[in-house]
Amino acid sequence: MIPIANPDVGREELDLVESVFESGMLADGPEVRRFETEFAELCDSTHAVATSNGTTALHTAMVALGLGPGDTVLTTPFSFVASANAIRLAGATPIFADIDPETYTLDPDSVRSVLADRDVDAILAVHLYGLPAKIDELATIADEHDITLIEDAAQAHGASYNGRPVGTFGDAACFSFYPTKNMTTGEGGIIVTDLEEVAEQAATFINHGRSDTYAHDQLGHNFRMTSVAAAIGRAQLEKLAEFTDRRRQNAAELTEALSDSAVVTPVEPSGTKHVYHQYTIRYEDRDGLQDHLDDVGVGTGVYYPTCIHNQPVYDAVTHSAPVAEKAASEVLSLPVHPGLSADDLSTISDAVLDYVRGDC
């Protein structure tokens, strides 16, 4: 089976983890500070605060930006549920706009339409599949309405928009380091921001609201990253550029092979750098294609089969997002990770073509 994801962790990670073990500082400590500094540099950001996972990063960013009960945050219905859950965990209320049918990210026109009808305190834009959202337009909208802009960059490590790294357009941005992401810490997340007060508030919130060893000025959680996770992340950062190049090369080869077929391949709009966390095609008979690929040993994933507003936990939300709902019925992600060989890529594209051309 060719897996949909294959985390690349090797000797470099083991060496740094071993040094953490030798130091005896397994929890939060200097290794986490080093990782925060290095990741902030990647994003051209002033501050970074590492957390236990991507969801806690989003939750913490909401709190650090002052969002909570009585506030409304507009986001996409086509994302992992954590995007909207973090809004609710902070006590705020999520509402949804629709997506662009080609990029699967928030449609600025739909955002403007929602904002014309109701007050919103913040926008949470998701850079889905590794492709930057139309973040310059969304930043303009946020400025026009004097509202907060947050970037969910959980799938977009190293992506950029007009040469500028994602994570630098909003008041804060959040990344995830889950094992299937473009780089991993095992489990982990991080917040980047240029706002010192937001970074300070985030660092306090993830550490029990602590201002001194046993002085707690506010409520908080234990959302800290461990030094072991940070060590893995520092080694992964060294490899990220190579990982990205290989993902982009693999994506280009798949797109070329599938270009004359009935499947819709991913787009990379002018000015964007797609880092292909997922290589997501679109096909009306998605389920049949997925079954065929499974039969011939090609792993796939559907990200995401149910829009957030249609999830049972969001039954109380009344919303219509026809573009997102249609995408949810047709998208299928193929393997694109750096571990693929030339033979793997041929096997994947040939299997897709066999099905859509009726040759199997």
Image (spheres, rainbow, N blue to C red):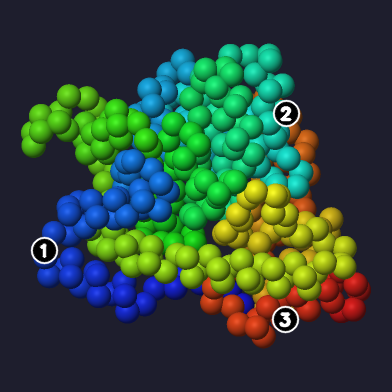
Outermost residue, left direction?
Answer: 214
Q: Nearer the viewer, mark 2 or mark 3?
A: 2
Crowdedness near tag 3: few (<14), some (14–19) or many (≥20) residues, C-alpha within 10 Å? some
Mark sitting on residue 10:
none
Mark sitting on residue 346:
3
Tell me: 320 left or right of 240.
right
- The image shows residue 340 at horizontal and vertical percentages of 59, 78
Label 2 sits on what residue type? Asp
- Under circle 2, the secondary element is helix
Q: Nearer the viewer, mark 3 or mark 1?
A: 3
In this figure, which residue is indicated by the disc labeled 1?
24
Q: Are marks 3 and 1 in contact (CB under 8 Å)?
A: no
**Which image quadrant: the N terminus?**
bottom right
Outermost residue, right direction?
Answer: 358
Query: Front-most of 344 and 84?
Result: 344
In this figure, which residue is indicated by the disc labeled 2?
109
- Residue 183's place in the image compared with 49, above or below, is below
**Which residue is depicted at the point 69% across and 68% down?**
252
Asked if residue 96 shows in the view, the reply is yes
- Residue 125's place in the image compared with 278, above or below, is above
